[in-house]
Amino acid sequence: GTHRKGTKALQNSMKYVQKYNVDLDPRYNELLGRHSKKAMGKICVSRQSAFSEPEALDYLDKLLRYDHNDRLTAKEAQSHPYFYPVIQEHKRQESNKLDSTV
């Protein structure tokens, strides 16, 4: 249960430290692994929450990746499927502006 999750988080933290050759102050060794990864769906418990949609959970998961190389870039974040409705609405409004000027 919890012990295994903590152990996995510690392993992931240590992999990151080793992968990027991070020289940590020894006081941080004790802190690594205290916080285990939680599934976004469990954090966002309300079905009414805007973040309970699968696209929103995927977006948050990809933004909150521990390894900076696995995280979404700003450009990738802007084009994530979570924002498709906003992008489509913006395109519709732009098209309406063009139609009304003709």
Image (cartoon, rainbow, N blue to C red):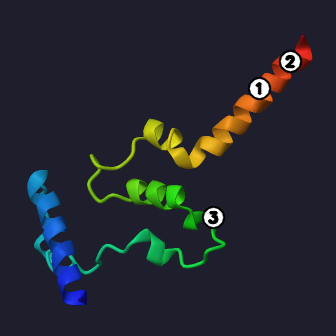
Would you say 22 lies left or right of 54 here? left
Q: Amino acid at mark 3?
A: Ala
Q: Which residue is mark 3?
A: 50
Contact check, label 2 and label 3, Cβ < 8 Å: no
Q: CA distance from mark 2 to mark 3?
A: 33 Å
Question: What distance separates the C-alpha of mark 1 from that of mark 2?
Answer: 9 Å
Q: Secondary structure at mark 1?
A: helix
Q: Residue at x 52, y 40 (%)?
A: 78
The residue singled out by tag 2 in the image is: 99
Disc 2 crowd rating (10 Å Cα; few below 14, some 14-19, many 20+) is few
Q: Which residue is mark 1?
A: 94
Residue count near mark 1 (Cα–Cα under 10 Å), binned few <14, some 14–19, many ≥20: few
Which residue is at the front of the view, 68 or 27? 68
Dot 2: element:
helix
Residue 81 drawn at (x, y percent)? 52, 45
- Mark 3 packing: few (<14 Cα in 10 Å), some, or many (20+)? few
